[in-house]
Image: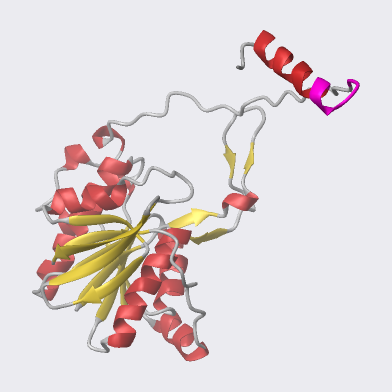
Amino acid sequence: MRILVCVKQVPDTTEIKIDPVKNTLIRDGVPSIVNTFDAYALEVAARIKDNDPSTKITLLSMGPAQAKDALRECLAKGGEEAYLCTDRKFGGSDTLATSYILSTAIQQIEKEKGEKFDLILCGKQAIDGDTGQVGPEIGSHLGIPQLTYISEITETAADHIVGKRESDQGYDLISVQLPAVVTIVKTPFDPRFPKLKDTMRARKTEIKEITFEDVKDIIDETRIGLKGSPTKVRKTYTPQRNKECLMIKEEDAKADAAKLVTLLSDAKLL
């Protein structure tokens, strides 16, 4: 099986701070990491490879040159080859433009390899944007079926897979014909730690770049970058936190509860 895993390098959200004047993210000094859900997607691919050593895992990302660090980390955890979409013309792309660029890159890779990917795995969402749109949009651009919010792939075959999707009532087992796009949520198992030999191999592995020139014959320039992005950020701001505390001390707990209900009703919160 040929598997493609889409990964994104994101800022560590636990370290992010907001500029109080500009209301923008302060990125200086903020470490970058592999998007959490993409790491789970890679682990799902690696487990398929554990059961079928003939499986090949290709990695694909989009971003500046520093995104190669994330790809090398993923190479050490099961990936065999990696591609980075990087070009100034790709800058400013929203989720629709990004998914279009990635889908075009996938087609270019398939053309170079002379074979199609059986399975495309993505994290359910990026922790810096939380839109959950890129994976499904890739499937739509490529015209192939998709499964979303899958926690495990329980069965693989030459022509189909079965995914486990959790629900409020338990979980559903859903079969889909290949090729397909699958988005992965937090899995019951943690991503593996890389072995030293795999880390050394990852450092030496060439990461191939895909630029606009490489795909200019199959890409529509009006659908990429800022001009190809229908989503526009009009304003960002940091919500003001007003901390007010009112202590209720009546004769007993019953009176406390009655007083609380009265206050909430007066404030039209009930």
Pick whichever, 58 or 262, lies toward us: 262
Identify the image quadrant of the C terminus: top right
Question: What residue span does the magenta drawing correspond to?
Answer: 250-255
Q: Which residue is drawn at 24% across and 64% down?
A: 120
Q: In which quarter of the image is residue 110?
A: bottom left
Magenta residue check for 251: yes
* Left or right for 124, reference 240: left
Pick whichever, 52 or 31, lies toward us: 52
Q: Residue at x 42, y 81 (%)?
A: 202
Query: Percent position (x, y) of residue 13?
Result: 57, 50
Q: Residue at x 31, y 66 (%)?
A: 5
Pick whichever, 72 or 130, lies toward us: 130
Identify the image quadrant of the N terminus: bottom left
Query: Percent position (x, y) of residue 146?
Result: 20, 56
Magenta residue check for 40: no
Identify the colour scheme used: secondary structure
Query: Percent position (x, y) of residue 229?
Result: 28, 35
